[in-house]
Image: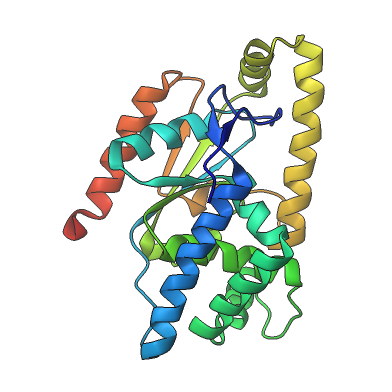
């Protein structure tokens, strides 16, 4: 598999770093999952235990990906941001595989998640949502992963997750993106309004809610007052080690 590095097209909320090609990384992750699934199918044992996981939830532009990358370098793990998760859920070939892995390893899990998230005993979950959930479980099973976005903390077993919410004022986000991409304040504000609306639509479509509640998280950091990403890395790293100290 090629490992070409490129500078991605503008993605609001990202930061200036050369990142691996999204399609390549998604295919690599699903390939690892396929090998794991084949080994599991041969034994038909219990699903693998999900390793302790970090899940970041944020408003676009707060700087979550930079913090996640800092933690990934510190811990030697990988980051799965919204682009990778969405690529797996949207790709016909990868989607088919991850839904199959998910359904075979976790029979009845869709109904369980639906009842937990929506409070309904019976419902119809779209193929997109099933693919999204399958992608998150597939990534979590195949190696230590830090998730950024897409509500991963709501999908994975809560006792296996350190859930972190990053917040800040809208002006902080606007100024950060304007400086990063050489935009005017008005241009950056318009772009953030667009992606905020997309995020609201996603949560309404997938989780039937407007936004993430602060009560869902282990830790909430206000980046208006923790503007150095390194400080946030140290805080989250300490919380993660403390929560899962018996497994290290």
Q: Coloured how?
A: rainbow
In percent of width and height, residue 195 lies at: 76, 36
Locate residue 114 relative to residue 28 in the image: left or right: right
Residue 123 image offset from top left, x and y in percent:
74, 81
Q: Where is residue 47 in the image (x, y as percent from the top left)?
A: 40, 80
Compared with 11, 183 (above or below) is above
In the displayed structure, would residue 34 be above or below residue 4? below
Asked whether residue 213 appears in the rendered view, the answer is no
- Foreground residue, 50 or 221? 50
Residue occupying image coordinates x 60% and y 79%: 100
Q: Is residue 110 above or below residue 89?
A: below
121 to 178, vertically: above or below = below
Q: Which residue lies furthest to the front in this view?
A: 2
Q: Classify residue 229 as left or right of residue 111.
A: left
Quadrant of the rendering where the C terminus is positioned: bottom left
Q: Give whichever of 193, 106 is nearer the camera.
A: 106
Front position in the image: 17 or 121? 17
Residue occupying the point 44% across, 72% down: 35
Q: Which residue is drawn at 54% across and 87% down?
A: 107
Quarter of the image holding residue 197? top right
In the foreground, 117 or 215:
117
Let me know if residue 74 appears in the view: yes
């Amino acid at each position: 598999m090629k490992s070409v590095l490129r500078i991605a097209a503008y993605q609001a909320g990202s930061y200036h770093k050369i990142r691996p090609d999204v399609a390549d990384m998604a295919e690599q992750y699903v390939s690892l999952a396929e090998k794991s699934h084949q080994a599991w199918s041969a034994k038909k044992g219990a699903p693998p235990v999900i390793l302790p996981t970090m899940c970041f939830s944020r408003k676009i532009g707060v700087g979550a990906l930079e913090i996640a990358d800092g933690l990934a370098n510190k811990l030697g793990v990988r980051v799965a941001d919204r682009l990778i998760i969405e690529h797996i859920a949207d790709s016909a070939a990868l989607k088919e595989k991850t839904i199959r892995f998910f359904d075979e390893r976790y029979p009845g899990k869709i109904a369980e998640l639906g009842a937990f998230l929506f409070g309904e005993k019976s419902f119809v979950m779209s193929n997109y949502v099933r693919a999204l959930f399958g992608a998150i479980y597939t990534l979590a099973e195949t190696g230590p992963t830090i998730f950024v976005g897409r509500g991963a903390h709501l999908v994975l077993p809560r006792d296996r997750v350190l859930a972190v919410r990053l917040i800040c004022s809208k002006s902080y986000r606007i100024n950060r993106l304007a400086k990063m991409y050489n935009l005017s304040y008005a241009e950056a504000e318009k772009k953030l309004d667009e992606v905020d609306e997309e995020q609201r639509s996603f949560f309404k479509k997938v989780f039937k809610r407007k936004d993430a509640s602060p009560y869902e998280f282990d830790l909430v950091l206000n980046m208006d007052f923790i503007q150095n990403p390194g400080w946030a890395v140290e805080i989250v790293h300490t919380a993660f080690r403390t929560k899962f100290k018996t497994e290290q």
